[in-house]
Image (spheres, rainbow, N blue to C red):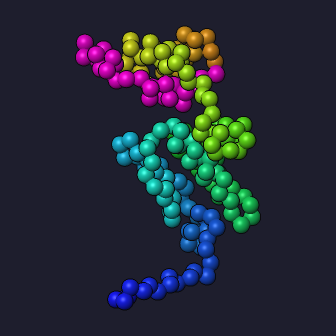
Amino acid sequence: MADGTTLPAPVRAVIPRSPRAWVDPGQEPRGLRVEVDGQRFRVQSAKFSTQWLPDTPSNRHLTVVWLRLLRDAHDQPCLTLQELAPLVGSANRQAASQPLEDFRQCGEDFRAFVLRKRKVDATVVEAVWAELLPTPLAGPTELMPRVQARLDRHDLSVANIESALEQISCVPVLRVLRR
């Protein structure tokens, strides 16, 4: 208003409690869509969207956990593991369950989950670097078994290799590519 006062916003009679409730009655959501823009991502559904976040494995895993914690009026998860799987780059629901298991192992404490010690230490980063230089266009899936063999470990995942790749400077890789 002109005199500097404001009017209260209209109150909604019903506030939806779950993303499924935001969809028109009789329509099922078409699932989640992961939208990527350069180094950012967001999650969208028929009626909601997250804000843009830096596209890192940690952010994707935390988003999986947060979205899986959403419950409907019957205390059922609003989103299935299958619907969350694309967030971790998979069509397999088991891929979405790993961040949830990690979260549970941290006592369902977000701070502990975010700060947990990872399998990716300097030794893993160095092994990934050593395996990457001979074949600089190799992806994490191709690098994983080679790194596991080099370190004689079998507990490393593709996500661990991606995390190690994030810590490697592109300068030595570019030198190899320029040759």
What stretch of residues is rendered in magenta? Answer: 155-179
Q: Is residue 129 magenta?
A: no
Q: Quadrant of residue 113?
A: top right
Residue 2 in the image: above or below residue 124: below
In the rendered image, the residue lying farthest to the left is 178
- Position of the C terminus, as image quadrant, is top left
Residue 70 in the image: above or below residue 9: above
Image coordinates of residue 174 in percent, x first then y, are 29, 20
Residue at figure coordinates x 56%, y 68% from the top left: 23
Q: What predominant SS class does the magenta segment belong to? A: helix
The mark total stands at 0
Image coordinates of residue 173 in percent, x first then y, are 34, 19
Q: Is residue 173 magenta?
A: yes
Nearest the camera: 81 or 168? 168
Residue 143 in the image: above or below residue 50: above
Image coordinates of residue 63 in percent, x first then y, are 56, 48
